[in-house]
Amino acid sequence: MDPAREASDAAPAPARPRDLLDASTDAAAVVSADGVVIGWTRGAEALLDRPAAEVVGRSAAHLVATPADPARVAAVAERCRAGMGWSGRLPVRHRDGRPLDVDLRVSASFAIGADECFLISARRPDRHWTIGQSVLDGFLTRSPVGMAVMDPQLRYVWLNDTLERFGGVPRAQRLGRRLSELLPGLQAETIEALMRKVLDTGVPVTDYEYVGWSWADPHRQHAYSTSFFPLVDADGSVTGVCYMVQDVTERWTARRLLSLVNEAGAGIGTTLDVLRTAQELADFAVPRFADFVVVDLLEPVLSTEGHGAWLTDAGPAPARPQLRRAGMSSVREGCPEAVARVGDRTDFLPPPHGARLLIDGEPVLIPVLDASDPLWTTEQPGRAASIREFGLHSLISVPMRARNTALGLTTFVRSLNPLSFQPDDVLLARELVARAALCVDNARRYTREHTAAVTLQRSLLPHALTGGTALEVSSSYLPADPTDGVGGDWFDVIPLSGARVGLVVGDVVGHGIAAAATMGRLRTAVQTLADMEMPPDELLAHLDDLVLRLSADRTDDVAVRQGTTAFLGATCLYAVYDPVTRRCRMARAGHPPPVVVAPDGQVSFPEPPAGPPLGLGGMAFEATEIELAENSLIGLYTDGLIEGTERDMELGMTRLGELLARSDGDLSTLCTSAVRRLVPVPQPDDIALLLARTHGLGPDRVVSWDVPVDPAAVADIRARATRQVEAWGLAELAMTSELIVSELVTNAVRHAAPPIRLRLLRDNRLTFEVSDASSTAPRLRHARSTDEGGRGLFLVAQLSHRWGARYTGEGKIIWAEQEISR
């Protein structure tokens, strides 16, 4: 082997500048897709000392000086087939067997005839150029990165110009002294501890960030990033420390801004409460950003009436806006700087600004507050005195606006923090207030809607319940947690004919105004259907049809607006109690069963067939009947009462029964305490409980007679009824009672089928009932002046408090009631 040639291969001549970009001398080869060399250039012959005859037609794998790696080759080929090519460093094998490192490039694939091929070029790595000492010294001295060398005692040995500028301490004063002696405001002790660690372990510490002040800018905090490296001599011992430092204040400020904004997103607006949100903004900013913060909201924002705020495009604003202090926080206990307290009215705007600041103004930055400024002493004398007393020296006021709506003003003030607010701080203040303003606006809108829903719901629920002499009733209603919205629970007690009483409880699916409005419609429908004397199962069937229609209307409306469907559903339980028979007939539509507590304290949950929830349609409802002893307690409730936190309805029903069985005292107290004990904390659903204690109508208050189908019998029946009315001490009603009985019985004898029976009931009203086996509906007619008859029911309607008809399995009952004077 030629030694000269070997030396040439080992140490190639330095490349001239034009050679660095010249690829004309590169070694090149064309390789087929199966790895066979089909082309070989003179540059390749020169690089590997392999003639073309020795390489062409053979596999290119023997030219590579590394073990075969099929996966890597396949990945490179796939990349080249995608048209991107590949480059990298790879050792190849010289003809004499030694490896050569080359920079390799593989082209995108191309076709030669029917073969897929790749062009591979290679060149030896270029030699690195060297720099002179003067160039190196200039680089170190003028580098934008601060650099210093410390001896083993951590004293300055050398530093560059950049570090001298960072610290503001001249080089001559630094050399031979330690950092802690020169710049105590830069966490000197912590930094020196890190340098000692590097001296002891020889392990570098990189990118250590810290914040502090320096003599170069003593009134502004800076952030620095520093790396520490050991200096090692020829024998491997550590002889000192080199450190490099960069001023990363802008990066640190941006990161701090982002961090604070992220924290604000989690800490502000945790509830849908306007005042709570305002206070969260003030608490968050103190002391992170300011020493004293006040949040003043416009009066309409805190109101639940009207629009509730100023629209920014609604025309001119009033000269002095009416604001109210909604939130306030200070580093001083009790906020002594404040002129107004939370809840007080205030009209603060930083002078000389007016109300337009709230509508379209930009944030106001006052880097230096001057209490002697005539604008403050004239327009804000109380606040000028506070500025002097507590050393308030810098201020930012940011208008609160969201969704084209002016909401108020947030003011940040510094006093104990010696740094004045800077323009960069305005960006953070604006972002914090913008986030809080959106939360305040959400809370304002929600509060308005929630208040409207609660008002609507309470207006639709019964304000006074009465069960007459048949039932002693009491109710308790607990609205849902405000954050979950108003629900659609309802209950009612409906007086019916024959001293009977209807009890109903229901629950509409969903929350909000729509649920409350639907509840009102269903409650009205139940009252109407109950007045029509429908039995419970038929009433629920008609109610189901109504919910289906309401759901169809709602679906059409939503489909138009959103392109979606809407389902409206509800559950309901309806029961009718008859004090004469002491029997209760009930049916339910997907609702929990009632609870019954017997006079001896025994608890039961009679379960009429469950039936489907209202709004499904196509399924029948069934009724069941139970007998209730005198002074029994029956309770109707919604599922929110028994679900509890465990979401176990059976456990909740057991607890409800135990609570109701413990007391036979005041019904109202029992009802309220049962709800409080079962639901001690706000729940996501409305809760309703309706309790009724039963009373029977004894034989002394009920009398009845069979009526023969003979017109002559009317007089005798009329006389008996009149005597009974007088015997009950209702002589003042005897005459009208005689007429009512006469007309009802006469109509039955003439037009109805036997058996016919007259019944009189006395509770809080005097009731007359005539039953017959006919199902013909009575019809009120207005007779002409020449007609001899046809005025019977008209007279009954005029003489009675109310009258009507109800149908039974045996026929019908015509009834009329008279008020009893108290």
Image (spheres, helix red, strand yellow):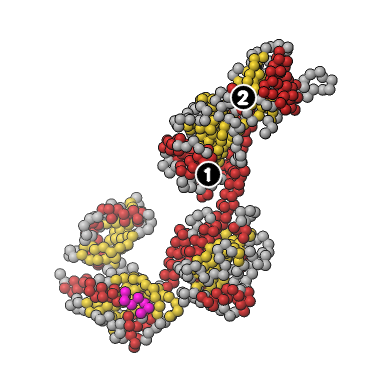
Q: Secondary structure at mark 2?
A: helix
Q: Secondary structure at mark 1?
A: strand
The answer, for residue 630, to whether it is visible in the render is yes
What residue lies at 57% left-to-right and 76% top-to-bottom? 385
Q: Which residue is mark 1?
A: 478
What residue lies at 71% left-to-right and 18% top-to-bottom? 718
In percent of width and height, residue 511 lies at 54, 44
Nearer the viewer's eye, disc 2 or disc 1?
2
User: From the viewer's perspective, is 734 left or right of 309?
Assistant: right
Which amino acid type corresponds to the residue marked 1 in the rendered image? Leu
Q: Is residue 205 magenta?
A: no
User: In this rendering, is residue 71 above or below 365?
Assistant: above
Which amino acid type corresponds to the residue marked 2 in the rendered image? Arg
Please give the label number shown on residue 701.
2
Examine the image and state in which quarter residue 495 appears.
Answer: top right
| Mark 2 vs mark 1, CA separation in Å | 38 Å
> Mark 2 Cα within 10 Å, few/some/many (few <14, many 20+)?
some
**Is tag 2's residue or tag 1's residue first in the polypeptide sequence?**
1
Q: What predominant SS class does the magenta segment belong to?
A: helix
Highlighted range, magenta: 184-190
Examine the image and state in which quarter residue 167 appears.
Answer: bottom left
In percent of width and height, residue 784 lies at 82, 22
User: In this rendering, is residue 310 above or below 793?
Assistant: below
Question: Farthest left residue?
Answer: 1
